[in-house]
Every structure is written in structure tokens, then in C-alpha cells.
Image (cartoon, rainbow, N blue to C red):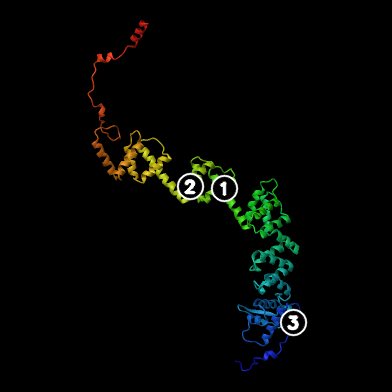
Amino acid sequence: MAFCGFADNFSMYDITPVENLFIQEFMTRAPGDYVRVYLYGLMLCYHPTGNAGPEEIARALGMENDQVLDACRYWERQGLMTRVTDRPPTYVYQNLKATMLSEPRQDDGLYRYRDFNNSLQALYGSDKLLHPQDFSKAIEWVEELHLPESVVLLLVSSQLGKRGKKASLKSMDKLAMQWAEQGVTTVEQAEELLYKESVPYDAAKQVLRQFNLKREPTKDEVDLVRVWLEEWHMDMGAILYACKETVKGRNPSFGYLNGILERHRESGQSAASMAAAMSEQQDLQKAVRALLTALGQASLQPSPEQQEIYRQWLSQGLEPGAILMIANRCARRGKNSFEDLVRSVDNFRKMNLLTEKQLKRYLSDQHVLSDLAQKVFDQCGWDHKPTVMDIQWIGQWLKKADADLILYAAECSKGTQLPLRYMERVLKNWTDKGISDVERARADREANRAKLPIQNGPGEARRPQKQPLPGQQYTQRQYTQEQMDALVFDLNNVKLDEESNQ
């Protein structure tokens, strides 16, 4: 504790000097709450009460903490207070007479542009506290670039609207120089420039390009686009997609486009769902166009029916990549119509082949089966191309026997009249006996051949000699040549006899 000091209740009965200069030059123009904060803080300067901060001042004055800080920032811009630290915020009071007397020697012009500085801070509000260097940058635009204060305020306001309250004045320096180079000296010129750089204006230009119209949009058209974007909250992609419906007519217009967009809203769709629906439709159209290109029909436009079929495929679980793979497969086979694609996709769907991975595995397996089927045909000497049924037949046998055993059965069937049927019997015989390898099959075949005395043909198994049926087991009668001649009638003699009888 200091050797000397005032009693605790001294400040209650003491006075706080307030200069008339403050009352006449500052108090009359300042908000009432800001004056209360200044006076209460001035009292604390003369009569400190410990660590009095913004919270204690706000509690004493019945105000919010942010209101106290706003007041301090206001007096800082007036040059009557100076910020010492930001966290926590601390301020010192400046001597009023010294501040006003030293104003002409100040280079930053903070006091001279205090109203302008207040307007700048008001644009940011309480979201961001401007520092002296921020004010100096704005003053530089006024004094060096010769931009009017009102134009600078409009420039800052427009950038805050686009980029948010965190945008710094330093980041706007390049734009300020561009405006100065373009000779912007009035608010009207600045507004015209901002109007042509606005999002609705640019969107309206994009719509005009969709209409194949090479002109600048009118104010009414820009205002209409602003409604779509800002009030209806529509996505630009949805608006441009809706333009495609308008170009079907002879005279596409903003009014016609507005009717399309409004019709979607009136049907109960929200702006978001409408944009999503339009985006989905655009994706469907793009996907079907890719299919037509794969089929060699790139010149055709996707029809609504084709898009609906594609939508149904997706709802059935088919992957887009799988559908495109099927389209490429159809094209390689010379099936280039969309109807061919529909039939092919339905066949794969019935086999539950829905994903690209499943389809690749299946086609790879089919390729292996097709090669094996061709080898089987070559082994059995059958000059045919394997059909789908043949490949499926090979696939069924692969579940019971390996490829080498199947090829050996094909080799055994060579030279028979119906090789595949013969293979079927041979393979069934081997599998019934539990024979699963070629060596055992060859041994079994040799054993069977050894038991059979008659060889019917090359490559065929020998069959036992047929025994006569029981009804044929009797002694056959033998005829002489004379007896055989007596059984033959001479037709010429029969005819002559008939004529003599007449």
C-alpha cells in the first residue's frame, strides 16, 4: 500500500473536471451512451478503483459490455482516447487541448477525417475493430487517388457485401486504384460500375448467351435475375438448365424463363429441390448422351424416354460405369441401337450383375469359358463357333471337373457322330466313378477298351457284338436257285395271258 492515498469513499465527494471544449465540440454530437462511458471512464482516471474493465463499467452504467467497447472505439476515432492493448482492451485518455493544438501537425489526418472514419467503422460495425493504419489507407485513397469520400465508402460497402466483414481495407487497395484509373469521381459512376460487376448482372448476361442474344441485359432483366438468386435462392446451374426449355420456342425470353421457374415453385418444390431436380435431369441427359456416343449414335439427342429408362436402371441398383461398359460391349458386337442396349442391360440385370466390378469379373470368366469351349470344339474336331449355350454348358461342367479332364473327354469324342453328347456320357461316367484327373480317366478308358472285342471306329469305344433276339433263334431255311426263280413272276407273260382270256 502507498504511503499516502485517498480514503475509500473520497471519490464520492470529489469532483471530475470536464472541459467546456469537450462539451461544445464533442459531447453535442456524440450518442448519449457514449458520453456516459467517456465521463465514467474520466472519473476512473482521477479516482482509480482497482482493475476496472469494460465489464465493471457496463455493470455500473447498466449497459452491455459491447456497448462500452463501441463507445471506447468511437472516442478513439475522435482522438480523445488511444488504445494500448487489444486483449484485454485497455485505453488511455488524451489531453483534449494538446490533441486539438497538435492536429495540424498530424500526418494521419485521423482527427481531420473523424466523420469519415466513423462512417468507415460503422460499415464494419462491431464485427471488426479498425486500426489507425486502416483509416490511413482509406484516407490515402481520398488524398492521393482523389476518390471522393462517398465513393470510398461505397467501394468498401460493396466489398464487404461480397466478401464479408473480415475483408481488410488493404485487400481493397487494388480495386481503389482501378476505380481511380477509370475516372470514377461520383457516386453515380461508382454505382453504374458496381451494377455491371454484380452477380445478377453477370447471371443475366449468361442467360442472354443461352438465348444466343449478343447484347447487354436491361435493368428489368437484371432485377428479375436478382429475384431468382436472392429471393427464390435458386442455383445458377438450375437457371441455365431451365433456359434449355425456353430455346424450344421461337422467341426465348426472360419472361418465359420466369414462368418456367415459377411453375416449379408453385408445384410445391422448394428452390433447393427444384435445383436438385434440374441438376439431376442434366446429369441424366449427359449420361444418356455418353451411352449414345458409345453406341456410335453421337449425333442423336437423348430423348425423355431414354432418360427415364436410365433413371430406372439407376433405381434398380445398376452402376453408371456398368451401364457404359455394356454399351461399349454392344457396340463391339455390332448392336448399335438403344433398344439393343436395353435388352443387353436387362439380361445382365436378371443375372444380378449390377456393378462394374461384378460385370468385369463375369466378362472375364466368360472369356475364359469361351476360350475353353473353342478348345473343346477343336479337340473333338467340330468346326463350329461356341454359342452362349455351349459356354454355359462348359461352365456347368467346370463345377464338376477340371479343364484338362473336359479337354480329354473332347479328345475321346473325336470322330463320333454327336461329340458333345458323347462327351456328356463320358464325363458323367467319370464323375459318377469319382474320377477327377486325366490319368485315372485314361486308365479307365483303356480298361474298358480291353474288355470290348469290336472297334467301331476311330476314337469310339468298342461295343460288344449284338446277340440275336429270342424270336430269331431258329434254323433258317435254305433255298435253291430254281426255287427262288419259281417265286418270281414274269409280268410280261401275265399281261399276254390276260389278253388271250379276253
Looking at the rendered image, the disc whose residue lies closer to the viewer, 3 or 1, is 1
In the rendered image, the residue lying farthest to the front is 502
* Left or right of residue 206: residue 343: left
Vertical placement of 249 versus 64: above or below? above
Question: What is the C-alpha distance between the residues marked 3 and 2?
Answer: 87 Å
**Is residue 375 among the parts visible in the rendering?**
yes
Looking at the rendered image, the disc whose residue lies closer to the viewer, 3 or 2, is 2
Dot 2 or dot 1: first in sequence order is 1
Q: What kind of element bears circle 1?
A: helix
Q: What kind of element bears circle 3?
A: helix
User: Which residue position holds label 1?
Assistant: 308
Which residue is nearer to you in this view: 228 or 451?
Answer: 451
Dot 3 or dot 2: first in sequence order is 3
- Quadrant of the snapshot with the N terminus: bottom right
* Left or right of residue 360: residue 158: right
**Is residue 302 among the parts visible in the rendering?**
no
Q: Amino acid at mark 3?
A: Phe
User: Which residue position holds label 3?
Assistant: 22
Where, by quadrant of the figure, is residue 366 drawn? top left
**Number of numbered markers:** 3
User: Which residue position holds label 2?
Assistant: 349
The location of residue 289, given as percent across then percent down, is 57, 46
Q: Are marks 3 and 2 in contact (CB under 8 Å)?
A: no
